[in-house]
Image: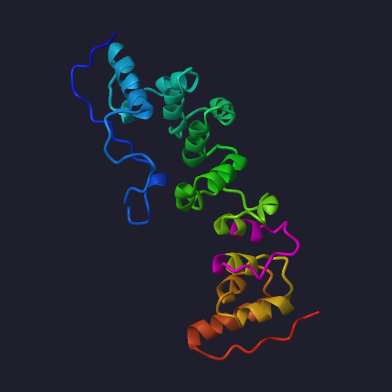
Amino acid sequence: MTVLPYVYQVTKYDPADRDQHGHYIGAEPANADHGPVEAAYLQVVAASAARGWPVGRRQLPWRRFETCAVSEAPGLRRVAASWPGLSAELVVALAQDDDEEVRIRLACHHPLAPPHLLLDAFVTRPVHRPHLLTLPALPRTGWAHLIDHPDPEVRAMAAADPTVPDPPLEDPHVSMRQAAAANPNLTPETLEALLADPATAEGAAANPALPIPRMHALLDHCLNGTPTPPTAVQR
């Protein structure tokens, strides 16, 4: 057994656990001296020290993360899943891991994480949603089956899914109506009505199906304060 020569403070920085102001909002205690994740980090430190490798996490050889990825210990696999440099082959393996936390960390940290993993993380872990929304791999389709989900944030993603032919516009939650108003399947006539409603105007203005002349009229209004009467729908 390797005896570490120092007392180590394990600091984990996960952008998914921070709000827009940088404050910690994660599920784990802000200060702890126990737990499987902290123990896993110290196991990595101990194993590296035993081989004479640098023990700073940023300096760990990439092979250590690959070793962690195939470990039987879920805590070590979580460490590997948090490293964005993991090989594509190991990403495929961890994406099917039995440990949910491994899959969640992979979705939040690795650019090659399968899109369905990001979708699952968004649905099951609300705390990570602000971070997931910044990731280009987060799918914009494939949400249709969640259109009746009890969480309005999940329903909003489903309402904006362009594969939903008839997005719901009467949901009691404003965020849901805004998302539905941005769905490109809406007709120009419907968009005109939504533009006139302050609760849905922002979503309708961002709708890619909005006729180009109407977009120009909206821009003129924003820049010059000129009126923006509804334009005739071109056939």
In which quadrant of the rendered view does residue 210 lie? Answer: bottom right
Q: How many marks?
A: 0
Give the residue at the far left of this rendering.
6
Measured along the vertical axis of the image, is residue 88 above or below residue 235? above
Give the residue at the far right of this rendering.
235
Q: Is residue 5 left or right of residue 123?
A: left
In which quadrant of the rendered view does residue 46 lie? Answer: top left
**Image position, residue 225 (x, y; %):** 50, 89
In which quadrant of the rendered view does residue 235 lie? Answer: bottom right
Q: Quadrant of the N terminus?
A: top left
Q: Is residue 223 left or right of residue 187?
A: left
User: Which stretch did the figure color magenta?
Assistant: 156-175
**Image position, residue 172 (x, y; %):** 59, 69
Would residue 137 be visible to someone looking at this image? no
Magenta span: chief secondary structure = loop
Would residue 14 be visible to someone looking at this image? yes
